[in-house]
Image (cartoon, grey):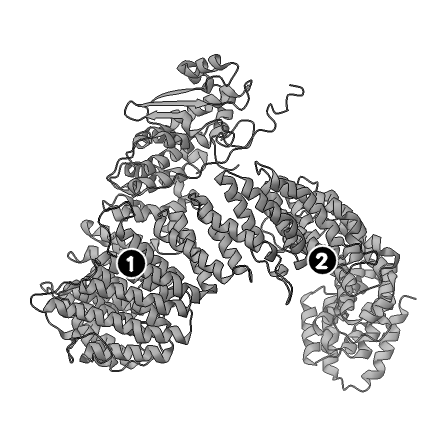
Amino acid sequence: MPGGTLLENANPLIFQRSGERPVTLEEEDENFADPIDDREVFDLIRSINDPEHPLSLEELNVVEEMRVHVNDQASTVGVEFTPTIPHCSMATLIGLSIKVKLLRSLPDRFKIDVHITPGTHTAEEAVNKQLADKERVAAALENSHLLEVVNQCLNTKPA
Amino acid sequence: MIYTPISMICQHLRTRSLLSRTMATDGAVLLGLVEEFVSGQQDSKAADTARGVKTGQFKILELVEALGLSLTSSQPQTRARGVQLLSEVLHECNSSLSEKEVEVLVVFYENRLKDHYVILPHVLQGIKALTKTPLWPPGLAVSVLRSLFRDIHVQSLMLVERSCVYSILINLMEFKEEELKGLGADFVFGFVQAMDSERDPRNLLLAFQIARNILLRGYELGKFTEELFEVTSGYFPLDFTPPPNNPHGITQEDLIVALRGVLSGTARFAQILLPLIIEKLDSDVQNAKLDCLQTLEACASVYSYSELKGFLSGLWASLRREVFQTASEKIEAAGLSALSALSACLSRSVLDSQGDDGLHVFLDLVIQDCQHHLCEPDLKLVWPSAKLLQAAGGASYRASHRITSVVMPKLMQQYISQTQCAHRRTLLEVLQGFLQPVQCSVPLEGDENVFSTFRESLCTVVFDALSESNSGLQVAACRVLVSLGQQPDLLLASDVELAISHLTRLVLEDEELQVSTAVLECSRCLSLLHPGTFAATIVPRLKEEIFTEPMTQGDGPPPKALRERCMTALAAVSTQPAVIRESAPVLLEVLASSHTGTGSFAADDALAACRSLQRIVEQAPDVEDTGRFFHDIIIPRLLGLALQAGLWRGVSPPRESPLTEEPVLLALVPVMGTACARLQPQLSAVTAARAVSLFLDGDVSFLQEDGLPAGLQLLRVPHSGSLSQLTCLLMACVCSVPQSVELPQVERLMAELEELSCTSTHPFSYISASKCFAGLVNKRPAGEALDLLLDRVMGRICSELDRASSSLRLQAFTLLLWVTKALLIRYHPRASVLTDKMFSLLTDHELGPLVADGFSVLMSDPVDVLTRAGHAEVRIMYRQRFFTENSAKLVQGFNSAEKEMKPSYLKALSHIVNNLPRQVQLSELPALLPLLREALSCPDQAVQLSTLSCLYPVLMDSSPVSTLCPQLEGLISRLLGLTSSPAMKVRITSLQCLNAVSHFPDHGVLPFRDRVLRALAPPLDDKKRLVRKEAVAARGEWFLLGSPGR
């Protein structure tokens, strides 16, 4: 890309944010146990910032609630994310941010699987493989520059 | 040559001195003072001299004579000293000068302007002092100004002297406007030269004030218009950051407003200012944009079409860009109001001879750029376009006519062609924005409403949307309906009826909270406008629904919920007397039926009826008519029903009625309390008197119920509580009347209440009696009678409390608590004695915990008695006062208490602190932190929770962090311990506190990072979602701590 400062996708479509999850009476009842469900995990990742735009992954439709699958009893979480364009070089970074956010926010009994929605990216397999490899994820987070970018994506407070 | 004026001044003044009887001693004193000031360099002597002149000991001319030598000295320093003394004295004494003295002094000073530079500052001070008096002979001001502009290079003066020059100009402009105008454009030129390159904010404020005066008072600008603009517009858009702690108190906003006053002061700047604004709007600095837009708005109120003519398209392009692309709501709002101002300005302008209508030209631009966005199928830019159109149209009737005629057909068309509910909803919301009545665009008398042409199609759209099943559409349609109703003549009688039938259907069928809120709000607004129709249609319909026997089977909503909705709706529409007269009897009938047991009404229905009645009473308009209705119908009926229910309990076999149940009685209290408090004074006096005679003497003559025995003394009925608990209704009546109302037999009433509250064994009865007693105590006038009464009651309470074996200690404490509250809130001096008694009871083994809870009663606002609405005497800030007077006692008591009694102190403390305003908490808490940390370890969950909620704002606030740091270890451990508390709310709040702690300075919290992260892992798997949410937030923050990219 000439100059290197131009955005890859300068004019993305923006989607509406879903509001805060309404609090139900059951949730306020001490004795009732709320299982971890799709929406809860989606709420964890929807506000992650995009590395390129001052927008959240939800607003760019990179993550959708229907692409989050949680099984609380089996302790598994599956998240599919959709890069805005098929050749997006940020895909790995976005995947890494999602993965790190889930690692920090879910109990460690969960097995977390983050991958690209099938057929939406040119280097789908390579990215999926990187994200599934524990050691590579851990190594990536040792890199302080990469960690800085990931933290910026996860830091949802207004600057 | 320099010295001549001085001899002249002395000579002139000497002629007058012959007339004055100067005492030789005073002269010597004066000479002494002058000598000490000039040669002795003692600055304080100036004040002494001024005092002498003020008291009449010396005359100004004597001072001048005494100064003679110093003023004529060949040493500039000495002359400076002399002039300084004269100027400082003049500053103090300028009001006592005569016209002749002024003239001579001014001429003197004017000549000094040419003198040595060290003298100049004092000369300017002197002239400034003299300009404070209006007694300048004609012509002098002009000559002084000429010399000033000619002889002095203002730009090279020091800050204080420049300020002097500006003050001189400001003062002269006040007194000598006509003369100064005679200077013509020279005055403006001189000023422009003087203020050029001024940089000090204090001086700029003065300079802007002069410039604004020049423009507003019509000074001749001549060929210097552009110069004046250049020299002021150089500061635009203004950027100023005050120095730390801002010693002069000048803010950027002050300067901006002052400069805006200049720039928007005249239409003559338009041709140069408008291009500048357009250019500066391109700036990236948000504040600059905001300033430009607000300045444009200010200008639009001065300009007319001829000034704006050449710039309309440029201005519009900039405004459109700001609204379409901005990220900041402030800028959007400023842009819209600037647009509105422009449109208003063009609407005002008179059409010129070529028939060139500026408003049309401008609105055509707006419409052309915005209308197609309304027609786009994806509605991407519909909101900004609609806001722009609304802003332009809201400015005047003409503008709204033009915009409406173009926009309305398009919106209707678009609404019909859209199929997606979300889009149709957006369109309805846009429509509502246009319909929202705006003050400026209200049609004049005789003008037709701009929407009349679209009346029918608007109604069709709204009713169509109301019959859709989508809740979003229904909500939006309700809002449009309200706006339609508020526009004159848009809803015909038949439309109102149709609207009511739609609303009724939604009330009966729709269960969604959002929809029913919108429907009720809409009904409320429309019932204000069409009370007659509502009373005649919706009220009978709802009544029928309420009294229909519920079907046991069927798909409909459960009958209870339906009944409750109907009653809420009845309350919502009861905004006008005409409706209340119909709706309140329905609710009373519900209560009566539930009382007699006909029609399967349960206690829940009675409760719902009470709540609806309460709402009606609260929102009823303050008119004689409704007051009389409450007084004649509602209050007697409620009292009668409750009394009858109480009596039925006592017969055998007892008949049960929901009206004897505590929750229902508690719900009746606010109905009667509010009704009594809102009655006209004479009516409330009658009501209170009736209540007193009913409870004391059993006078039932004003009640209509059958079978009520006369002569029953309700406060003295022994056993059970079914009748004595009615005291709560007595409280509602007598404690909410205004203080001016005199209650009959009040002594006897209080004695009986005291007896009941001290001896009854029925908790609801003795609590009500205590509250009622306290409510009366609060309103008794201060004085001996009240003191005697308090002595008696306190004696009784104390003797009861001191007898450890007594079974009535709880009753005595309850009475003590409420009387304390009653005195505390009116700042009665006895309050402190009673409070001390409360504190001493904290260590009581039996009552301790109850006493601790009692402090929450003392510190919070009760709902049923001792309220401001109920005309109680409540001083503001009684909580702060209580806290400052007693916090030390509390801490001391805590430290000296036995171990098992400490929790009571902590509980009391947390109640007190929790009810303090946030601002006070923040300033007071750091001192109490050690105690609060103790409270976190207290096993009582209520104490934990209230302590955590006190702590949270303190932790969020950064100021006390430094005092906290040494105690972090203990604090974090305790907070982490609470994350596994059995109480959900404690877990949530402790996690929030931990989140706040992560924002402390890194060096303080970093050592705890790993420990906290480990300890926060288990809460991530909490069984409650709300807890997990806080755990995730807190853990995320702690992860970011000390890590790059935070």
**Which residue type does callout 1 highlight?**
Ile
Q: Is residue A114 above or below residue B625?
A: above
Find out whether the residues at labels 2 and 1 contact each other: C-beta distance under 8 Å: no
Q: Position of residue B545 (x, y in %)?
A: 30, 57
Q: Nearer the viewer, residue B264 or B790?
A: B264
Chain letter for the residue marked with disc 2 in the picture:
B
Q: Residue at x 77, y 48 (%)?
A: B311
Residue B546 is tagged as: 1
Chain letter for the residue marked with disc 1 in the picture:
B
Q: Is residue B935 above or below residue B135?
A: above
**Which residue type does callout 2 highlight?**
Ser
> Circle 2 — which element?
helix
Label total for image? 2
Q: Is residue B621 above or below residue A140?
A: below
Discs 2, 1: same chain = yes
Q: Is residue B537 left or right of residue B266?
A: left
> Circle 1 — which element?
helix
Q: Position of residue B803 (x, y in %)?
A: 11, 66
Q: Is residue B556 left or right of residue B717?
A: right
Q: Position of residue B811 (x, y in %)?
A: 17, 65
Q: Residue at x 54, y 39 (%)?
A: B418
Mark 2 vs mark 1, CA separation in Å? 54 Å
Q: Is residue A43 left or right of residue B24?
A: left
**Number of other residues with Cα within 10 Å of mark 1, as a class: few under 14, some 14 to 19, many 20 or more:** many
Task: Report which quarter residue B638 is drawn in.
Answer: bottom left
Q: Position of residue B577 (x, y in %)?
A: 40, 70
**Which residue in the structure is indicated by mark 2?**
B347
Q: Earlier in the sequence, mark 2 or mark 1?
A: 2
Q: Is residue B446 visible?
A: yes
Residue B605 is tagged as: none
Task: Report which quarter residue B120 is drawn in.
Answer: bottom right
**Number of other residues with Cα within 10 Å of mark 2, as a class: few under 14, some 14 to 19, many 20 or more:** many
